Amino acid sequence: MKSINGVNWKKNIVPERLILKNKQDYNISYLLSKIFLDNKYNEEEIQNSIFNFSKTDIIYQN
């Protein structure tokens, strides 16, 4: 493909079966599964991205 600036780039091909496997294993969307595979995330990075719990303590001062 060619961008507006004239730079050539290509789209990485990710096997459909791997996308569907990740989608089912992690209960995520098709697009998110494809992004994780395209960027070569490992299992730990996927888990941290999906189950990101933010612990915030609210402190009130009088």
Image (cartoon, rainbow, N blue to C red):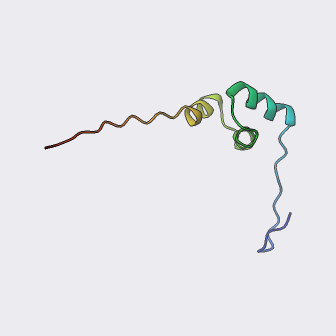
Q: How many marks?
A: 0
Decide: is 13 above or below 3: above
On the image, which quarter does residue 29 sit in?
A: top right
Q: Residue at x 21, y 41 (%)?
A: 60
Residue lying farthest to the front in this orientation: 62
Residue 33 image point, x, y percent: 73, 37
Q: Position of residue 47 (x, y in %)?
A: 59, 30
Q: Residue at x 47, y 33 (%)?
A: 53
Q: Is residue 44 left or right of residue 6?
A: left
> Residue 18's spot in the image, x, y percent?
81, 32
Image quadrant of residue 10? bottom right
Q: Residue at x 51, y 35 (%)?
A: 52
Quarter placement of the N terminus: bottom right
**Relative side of 29 to 50, left or right:** right
- For residue 51, which quarter of the picture? top right
Toward the left, the furthest residue is 62
Tell me if residue 51 comes above or below residue 32 in the rendering.
above
Q: Residue most toward the top?
A: 25
Instruction: Name the residue located 35 percent from the left edge and 37 percent from the top edge.
Output: 56
**Camera-nearest residue between 57 and 46:** 57
Please indicate whether residue 45 sits to the left or right of residue 18 in the image.
Answer: left
Q: Is residue 1 above or below residue 41?
A: below
Quadrant location of the C terminus in the rendered image: top left
